[in-house]
C-alpha cells in the first residue's frame, strides 16, 4: 500500500507562495519578451551625408554684456522605425563637443521650408516636426516606415575660445539624438561640412535672423 501520509505533512502555504512566485516570474518574463518584441526601434540616417549636413558662421551676438560666437548647423535627416509598434517622436537634439572636451546639447529652432531653384523649378524640403503648406509635419513613424526633414540648431558661446566646437579640416562632428514618446532613443554621428552663410541663405533666406529669441548658450 502506498504511503500517502507524507502528503499531509507538507507545508502547503509555502508551496502555494512558491507557486505564485514562479507564476509571477513567468508572467513577468512573458510581458518583458512581448515588450521587447513589440518595441519601436529607431534609426537615424543622414540624407546625402556629403551634401545636406552643414555648419556656417553667424554674426556675433551679445550675452550678459559679452560678445558671443555663433555657429549655425543645418542638416537633413531621415528617421526610421524598424520595430513593429508605431511611435511618435518627442524630441530631437544635437550634441556638439567643445575644444575643452565638454558636450553641449542644442535644441532645434523653428525654420520655414528650405527651398532651392533647380533648373526652372522651385524645390521645397520638409522640416522635421513642422507643418507647412507642402508637408504635414507629423512625427508619427509607423512600423517599417520613416520620416525625414531639415533641422536647424545654433551653437553660441562666449569667453574662453576652448568653448568653441572642434573644427578639423573644415568639418565638425556631432551627435544627433532622437527620443520617442515611449522613451526609446537613437543616436547617430553627423559630420558637418563648412559652407558660407550666403550658401545657407540660398536655402533659407533669413536663416541668420531666426535665432534671436531662442538661444542655448554654452556657458563658460
Image (tube, rainbow, N blue to C red):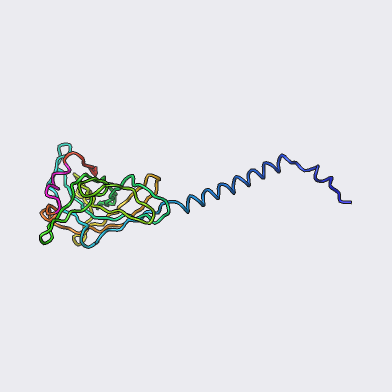
Q: From the viewer's perspective, is 190 left or right of 17?
A: left
Residue nearer the viewer, 59 or 204: 204
The one of 147 and 60 positioned closer to us in this rendering: 147
Q: Position of residue 96 (x, y in %)?
A: 26, 51
Q: Residue furthest right?
A: 1
In this rendering, the answer to whether 9 lies above or below 101 is: above
Q: Left or right of 213: which side holds 144?
A: right
| Closer-to-camera residue (199/113) | 113
> Percent from the top left, x then y, of residue 143?
39, 54
- Residue 127 drawn at (x, y percent): 23, 49
In the rendered image, which quarter contains the C terminus?
A: top left
- Marks counted in the figure total 0
Residue drawn at the location 26% of the way across and 49% of the way down? 128
The part of the chain drawn in magenta is 203-211
Residue at coordinates 51% horizontally, 52% vertically from top-left?
A: 33
Is 210 colored magenta in this rendering? yes
Q: Does residue 104 appear left or right of residue 209 in this picture? A: right
Q: Position of residue 65 (x, y in %)?
A: 15, 37
Amino acid at each position: 500500500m502506498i504511503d500517502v501520509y507524507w502528503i499531509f505533512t507538507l507545508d502547503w502555504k509555502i508551496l502555494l507562495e512558491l507557486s505564485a512566485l514562479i507564476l509571477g516570474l513567468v508572467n513577468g518574463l512573458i510581458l518583458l519578451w512581448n515588450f521587447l518584441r513589440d518595441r519601436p526601434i529607431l534609426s537615424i540616417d543622414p540624407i546625402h551625408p556629403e551634401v545636406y549636413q552643414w555648419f556656417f558662421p553667424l554674426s556675433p551676438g551679445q550675452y550678459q554684456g559679452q560678445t558671443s560666437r555663433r555657429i549655425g548647423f543645418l542638416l537633413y535627416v531621415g528617421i526610421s522605425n524598424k520595430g513593429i509598434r508605431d511611435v511618435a517622436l518627442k524630441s530631437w537634439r544635437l550634441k556638439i563637443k567643445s575644444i575643452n572636451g565638454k558636450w553641449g546639447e542644442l535644441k532645434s529652432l523653428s525654420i520655414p521650408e528650405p527651398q532651392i531653384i533647380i533648373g526652372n523649378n522651385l524645390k521645397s524640403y520638409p522640416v522635421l516636426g513642422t507643418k507647412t503648406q507642402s508637408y504635414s509635419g507629423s512625427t508619427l513613424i509607423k512600423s517599417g516606415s520613416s520620416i525625414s526633414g531639415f533641422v536647424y540648431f545654433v551653437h553660441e558661446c562666449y569667453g574662453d575660445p576652448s568653448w568653441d566646437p572642434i573644427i578639423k579640416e573644415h568639418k565638425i562632428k556631432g551627435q544627433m539624438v532622437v527620443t520617442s514618446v515611449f522613451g526609446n532613443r537613437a543616436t547617430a554621428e553627423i559630420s558637418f561640412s563648412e559652407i558660407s552663410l550666403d550658401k545657407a541663405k540660398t536655402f533659407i533666406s533669413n536663416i541668420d535672423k531666426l535665432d534671436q529669441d531662442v538661444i542655448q548658450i554654452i556657458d563658460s
